[in-house]
Amino acid sequence: MRKTITAYKKIGESPLDLIKRLREESPELRDEKMAYAGRLDPMAEGLVLIVIGEELKNFDNYLKLDKEYEAKILFGFSSDTYDILGIAKNGDLQRVSEGRVKKVLKELKGEFFFSLPPFSGYKIKGKPLFWWALEDRLAEVYIPKKKATVYSLSVVKTERMKKEDLRKDILWKIEQVKGCFRQKEISKRWKEIFDAEREEKEYLVVKIKVSCSSGCYVRSIVNKAGTVLGTGAVLLHLKRTKIGKKREDTGN
């Protein structure tokens, strides 16, 4: 029996949904204890490391592995989740320029203290942060900043997305998410934003590649970039491409 599995989580799946799917697809795993080492947000896709059976005694070691991601950043917006699965607000589209964006992104390397996303699984007083946020009780808790290291961050591609294409992409992704994540309210807000824009606009989307330490929230990097630029920025898409040395399931 393998000690770990590097499995691919689909957009909209939770890590628990992924484990359930693995049990259904692989009969030999149905009676095995399994746990995922490192979450992926509902909107994200990519590699998740699953620890199996007796290897769970070494579970903490797998939480420390470095990660690599590909991400798409949408500039000119902000949200309370730092990604598109949040209550969105218009930012400052007039201040978005590719030159300034690339300059700021290149500076987001090294060791940083990042603000934890209010909607995340980080536990405070036994409850995940998203619970405090949904209960509108964030003011009752101290949200610590998280130290993480960004080893490299490079711009892969920049593009301009038309309003209707962006609208379809965002609403489709929200529809894929299972569970209670305020989807109706979030979709309604995005529709209001796009409906209010009577002119056909194009929105700046920048694809980046990030190599970072464990515990680094790409959403927080995106939010920091938007704050520094004064434009607002949200995570449009995230794919985890590497965990430790694993890029695909090697059966180790």
Image (cartoon, helix red, strand yellow):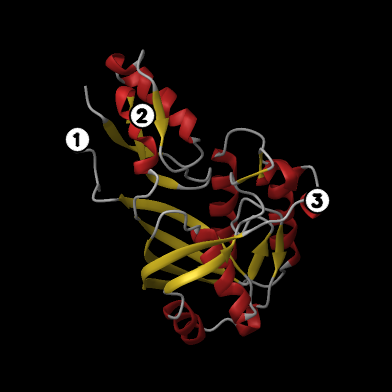
Q: Secondary structure at mark 2?
A: helix
Residue 159 seen from this side: no
Q: Which picture quadrant has residue 52? A: top left
Q: Is residue 112 visible?
A: yes
Label 2 or label 3, whichever comes before in sequence order? 2
Q: Which residue is mark 1?
A: 252
Residue position for label 3 = 140
Q: Could you tell me which secondary element the residue under label 3 belongs to?
A: helix
Note whether 9 is above or below 16 in the view shown. below
Report the residue that reaches farthest toward the front: 57
Distance (Cα) linking label 2 and label 3:
35 Å
| Quarter of the view holding residue 60 | top left
* Nearest to N terminus: mark 1 or mark 2: 2
Question: Marks 1 and 2: which is nearer the front?
Answer: 2
Disc 2 residue type (three-letter): Leu
Determine the CA span between mark 1 and mark 3: 44 Å
| Label annotation for residue 56 | 2
Q: Nearer the viewer, residue 32 or 19?
A: 32
Residue 224 percent location from the top left of the image:
57, 71
Where is residue 165? Give x, y as percent.
Answer: 53, 59
- Identify which amino acid the numbered label 1 is placed on: Asn
